[in-house]
Amino acid sequence: MSLILPLGILAAVAVIFGSKSASASETEPEVPRPVPPPDPKVPTGPAVGSPNLPSAETPETIQAAQEAIEAVRNSNWESAVVAAILSRDAQTVDRIADQMSAAGLLSQAETVRGVARAWREEAARQENERRAREAEETNQPVVPVTPEDIRAAEPPPPPDPPVNPQRVAAEELSAYVLSTTRSKADQAKIKALQIAMGEVNADGLYGNVSARRIASFGLIPPSPFYWPASNAANVLAQYQQFLQDRAKADPARADLWMAASRNAGVVRW
């Protein structure tokens, strides 16, 4: 079954994220972004068994569906949408749209839901054409299906991927830094967590490189303890801009990202 977007995937994502002006009225305390598992689902209805269902069936599309969920965990919305579309799985696309709505990306989420709706409409059209051909050959009446029948017949999305251990280490480092101060920090512990979360030049000193790594997992990082001995003001300004860019991409937690930007240069001794 061919289910492609008229604009192409990258062009479609550019349209979806062309404007990031959506905002939420409130923000929640910083917690790792959960991705609720899908509700248990038993396919039902007249379209069960149709070869035209928009679902992930190959190793490549199953992997793409799992990559979409991992991208949501890291608040990487554009990558999540690209992976969901590549999965060809309407259930996964709906899950991504739900998570985007929860994050305050309301208009973008509705556009993403439109992808799943278009897939189901096309699936129903192709299934009805197939049934019409079979009915003609067997001289039996046609039992047509609707997009809602297609949705009811879709199997559950692929299972979620395991939580990235590097993300777990990033959560632990963030919690530890918040629990201590620069003068009391255990540099050996910090170095071990830096290595565990994939930081290349781990040194046991919690600086802006470690903070950026934490942010790459969708976590709002604590203020760095250390800044470069030279060009510190410029590095601080770049880091603050990095956090402000994150705020624009994550409306539901924009206030928290902006607070992190304002407090970035405040070192807890």
Image (cartoon, helix red, strand yellow):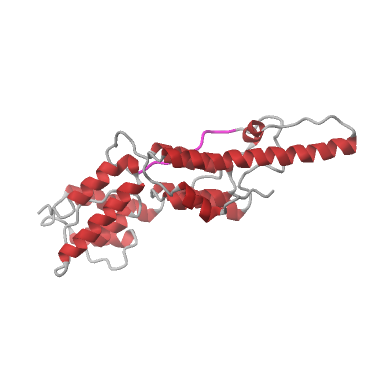
Q: Give the residues drawn in magenta, as a range.
A: 33-41
| Of residues 156 and 215, the one drawn nearer to the viewer in this rendering | 215
Query: Residue 4's spot in the image, x, y percent?
Result: 62, 50
The quarter holding residue 125 reads: top right
Magenta-colored segment: predominant secondary structure: loop
Point 31% across, 52% down: residue: 245
Query: Residue 112's spot in the image, x, y percent?
Result: 51, 42
In the image, is residue 97 part of the stretch drawn in magenta? no
Point 26% across, 56% down: residue: 241
Q: Is residue 176 left or right of residue 216?
A: left
Q: Is residue 161 left or right of residue 137?
A: left
Query: Residue 80's spot in the image, x, y percent?
Result: 47, 49
The quarter holding residue 267 reads: bottom left
Q: Is residue 114 left or right of residue 25?
A: right
Q: List the single residue furthest toward the bottom.
A: 230
Q: Is residue 207 visible?
A: no
Point 34% across, 49% down: residue: 218
Query: Residue 150's spot in the image, x, y percent?
Result: 66, 35
| Of residues 21 and 26, the one drawn nearer to the viewer in this rendering | 21
